Image (spheres, rainbow, N blue to C red):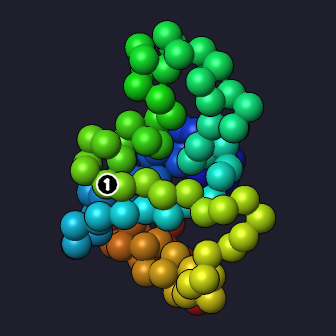
Amino acid sequence: MDATTKLNGAAFLREVVEVFPYQIHTVLTDNGMAFANLPKNCGRYPEIEAFFGGHIFDRVCDQHGIIHKLTKPYHPPPQAPACGPCRRRIDGLLAINGRIAKPSG
């Protein structure tokens, strides 16, 4: 999954929930399109949002009882240096279950 699309963000979260050995309580993401609607589009079509239930990433979070938090725009999270090692662990778990190619390094 190279593209950062809504469906890829949701699919990645589903795979992580499936293989991660711990209960995930909270997910902190940036405000990218894979994770959140643009502020200018929020509330623009309330009848569509009510029918579909909002952003697909939020729906996946709701299905698994996960709280989805967004970072402030243009402010990286304070644990940014840990993102690389955490990502490698998650990729390793997915690789063990045959979901993605084994990470190099």
On screen, residue 9 above or below 103: above
4 or 57, nearer to the observer: 57
Residue sitting at 49 percent across and 10 percent down?
A: 47
Write the residue at 72% across / 70% down.
75
Quarter of the picture containing the C terminus is: bottom right
Q: Is residue 5 visible?
A: no
Q: Is residue 26 above or below residue 56?
A: below
Instruction: Work out whether 43 lies above or below 28.
Output: above
From the image, tell me which residue sits under label 1: 66
SS label for mark 1: loop
Query: For the view shown, which residue lies furthest in the right direction?
Result: 74
Frontmost residue, 27 versus 75: 75
Residue 101 percent coordinates (x, y): 50, 66
Q: Is residue 76 left or right of residue 51?
A: right
Residue at 65%, 19% (x, y): give it. 44
Indicate the quadrant where residue 84 lies: bottom right
Judge whether 80 appears above or below 6 on screen: below
Q: Is residue 95 left or right of residue 29?
A: left
Percent x, y of residue 23: 22, 67
Mark 1 nearby-residue class (10 Å; few <14, some 14–19, many ≥20): some
Q: Residue furthest top?
A: 47
Residue 55 located left or right of residue 77 = left
Q: What is the three-letter code of the residue carrying label 1?
A: Ile
